[in-house]
Amino acid sequence: MLDKNVFSKVLDEALKRGGDFAEIYVEEKTISNIYFDDNKIESINSGREKGAGIRVIKDGSTAYVYTNDLSTESLLDAASAANHAAGSRKTINRPEIALNLKSIDDQLNLHPGQLSFADKIEHILSANKIARDYSKEIRQVTITLGDVRKNVQIANSDGELVEDERSRVRMTVNTVAAQGNVVQTGYESAGEIGGWELLQKVSLDDMALKAASLAVNMLTAQPAPAGKMSVVMSSTAGGTLVHEACGHGLEADLVQKGLSIYKDNRGRKVAAPGVNIIDDATIEGQYGSYKFDDEGIRAQRKVLIENGELRGYMYDRLTAKKDGTESTGNGRRESYQHKPIPRMSNTLIGPGSEEPELIIKSTAHGLLVKKMGGGQVNTTNGDFVFEVQEAYLIENGEITAPVKGAILTGNGPEVLKNIDSIGNDLGFGIGTCGKDGQGVAVGDAQPTIRIKQLTVGGTMMADGPRIKRIRRK
Amino acid sequence: MNEERLKEAGIIALEAGLRQGVHAEVYLMASRQLSIEVADNVVETLKESDETGLGIRLINGDKLGFAYTSDLSAQAILDAVDDAYHITTYTYADKYNILPPGLYEYQTMELYDKEIKTTPVEAKIELARQAEKAAREADNRITIIERAGYEDAEYISLIMNTNGMYASGQGNFSGVYIYLAAEEKGDAQTGFAMHMSKWFKDLKPQEVGREAAVRATRSLNARSISSAILPCIMEPYVVTQFLSILSRMVNAEAVQKGKSLLAGKLGQKVASACVTLVDDATRIDGTGSFPFDGEGVPTRCNQVIAKGILQNYLYDTYTAAKDGVSSTGNAQRGSFRSLPTVGTSNFMVLPGNNSTEALIADIGKGFYITEVMGMHTVNPVSGDFSVGAAGIMIENGGLTFPVHGVTIAGNIVDFLQNIDAVGSEMRFYGSKAAPSIRLKSLSIGGE
């Protein structure tokens, strides 16, 4: 990694002709991914990468230059280019920047466990066998194991220097089951910051079994009903809903641009009583946790909505300055190739006090969602659409038939006001969140909740004609 | 970074591979990018990048290994070759793991526009500003410009292998885009438009601004409708999103693994007779144009569906060897960081001869679809789709009120057969292109 003196020189160059703030972010990364499909190791990918991104902010405008040549000469060139791009013209004299290393009280200390390719492959082969042995209907099993290690240095013209070691592991199982003309898929994923000690907490074999049984069970599921109904979302569904339908609208950049439904709503009731929404980067081990964000700010726990009332937004340095407040430690970036922007870490709906079973029991008619798929949201008006992977009908308080092909459409803010039961459990999910072309690791969580009324779109009309099921030869 | 410097690095990699006694291929890339984001006439972000790297693929007695590095020093390259070799001791032998033969003739393609390089940054900023200005002037309900942007990129890519291959090429492109929102009576709707071009002088920022303004304002005060089965028209942008699903279904890898509904259907009628689908990297005007693919195989124009009949799957060298056919030149690389995989270049539904107005004219009651949400959730294995949609109602041959909050559902197989007319104006969105299409009927889920 780079020397303190190099950082000082680069930062001086970056502000030579003026500018309000300069920063250099250096990253050295090694990655390893195994992709197993169709009963064989399809590919193993291993890579090493390093690079630096230099940022100059002047009057709220950002110039960002990155390079993967870490020679001092190349970094000074990049700093000069950034300074020039920021619109600075005149050389000014300023005192040399003295850098102080921020101390780390190792709350999230990493001793990531390593695993050889041979050991990883052994886990994969075992899981593959378990999924395939589950049923003759299982036609395909895809398993991935991936890990990333990063050494990061961040130095800025406020004199802050942060050095951080990061490690993250992730594993996924995808299954395809077929019976006659019907094809269904199942999916399980797990991940955390840290290393392969994850395998001691989560068994890849169990994940394979779950993914296989989900795909097989859905083969005989009936098409989901369509129309407005009560939807109970189990804590096992993870927090895709809170992330997509609410979290993005609370990111300060979208709020400041007027692109969020939550703009100018601080202090107002935006959700049903009892609803708490929190973004927490400090939860030990969780996939979206970190020690410092990508601008060198300590990770925080931030209450966004408290008992239905909007408390605040998620900020990075730039948006915080604009609002005259402090960063909430949500400035994140995918890599040295990207400028930091406000992002979520682990976003969750806080647990309530009701027993999950009683929430279902008290539902006369509705849909129980056990597992969510992907989703998309329009943050400007809050409209969302979510795919459901695993769902069941609720009839007279009882869980009855599994249904497939359900999608949930609705409006985030309306859903938050429509939550009428909050369970005392909490389930986590992991994901990679994409925004402005940058993917970052996030976690999300929710208790079992009931939404009074939500539009379910399926392949069967509630009171219209049944859609012909597709016959394939 | 010039070609000579990349070539030197490539030779170090191949020689190290030969010393290990294996077949080797090295893919080298150097690129520069510029992106400018303007909002409220102010440059919000200006970003420049400079990137180089290589990916090394080794075949050790039918076993495959891959590693990459962004550091082109001799030591880093040797480390990458060692990593890749180490990986070959864990992967399985597969006799179809082969590298393309060495010597090909490549066609000359003019893919580099000097004007992009010589135009000063200030003039490029101005293009983004023009897009914003045109959008604001188009309609006073345009209240928010999230971002108006200009981007350009240039790249050199070079592929060498131990069969004697040497393929090198360079290209560049530029583009203007805008994201905005319109507001009226408490409703807010977003609009987006982009235009990418091989030729700098063809960029039309004002048109981009006006198009996004129209997209946002026409959706204002949209409402939901009752569930129904209706004839539909899809705008080119929506069709290109369906093309992303189709591109995964005509991919030989998916076909061979039984993950495509189109497996075993060559020569069969899989779509309506008005549908012709091609993949063509040799066209100059798409962003997927290049003389050779990600393994150095010359590209060509591939007919995938001709008048509704499935003609061809898309192959790279590995999948072609498995089926005993030739590669169609469809090995794609996202970057030097990954192995080549089968993918599309310029993937296009060819235009028909109906204007959009003519497509709408004979519809008594229908739905004009301008936006779909959640396409990435569509299951390419079963072909079932159920996605969010927004658009405009068609009544008595004309567009009437805006609609949102509905879902459209069906299966890709029915979707292809259901197309009963194709529009005459094909538009590129990145490397995918399509005209408007009309569907006889589609299931719409609403209130």
Image: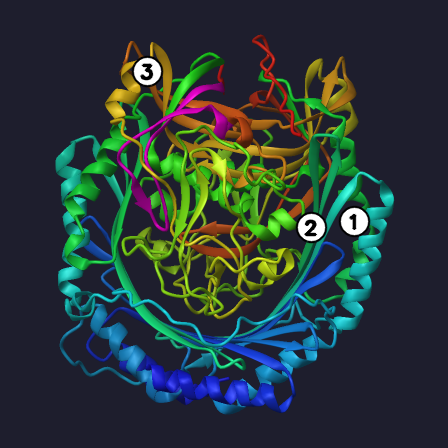
- At a point 58% along the width and 62% down the height, the residue shown is A290
Q: Amino acid at mark 3?
A: Ile
Provide the residue designation for mark 3. Answer: B394
Task: Tally the marks.
Answer: 3
Depth order, front residue of A460/A451: A460
Q: Residue at x 25, y 38 (%)?
A: B212
Q: Which mark is residue A189?
A: 2
Q: Check residue A244 for magenta coloring.
A: no
Cα–Cα span, label 1 and label 3: 48 Å
The answer for how far apart the CA atoms under marks 2 and 1 are is 10 Å
Pair 3/2: label in front: 3
Residue at mark 1? A208
- Please tell me in which quadrant of the rendered image residue A383 appears: top left
Q: Dot 2 falls on which chain? A: A
The chain letter for the residue carrying disc 3 is: B
Mark 3 neighbour density, 10 Å: few (under 14) some (14–19) many (20 or more): many
The percent coordinates of residue B163 (x first, y second) are 53, 80
Where residue A36 appears, x then y in whole percent?
Answer: 71, 59
Q: Is B436 contained in the magenta span? A: yes
For label 2, the SS is strand
Q: Which residues are magenta?
A: B415-443
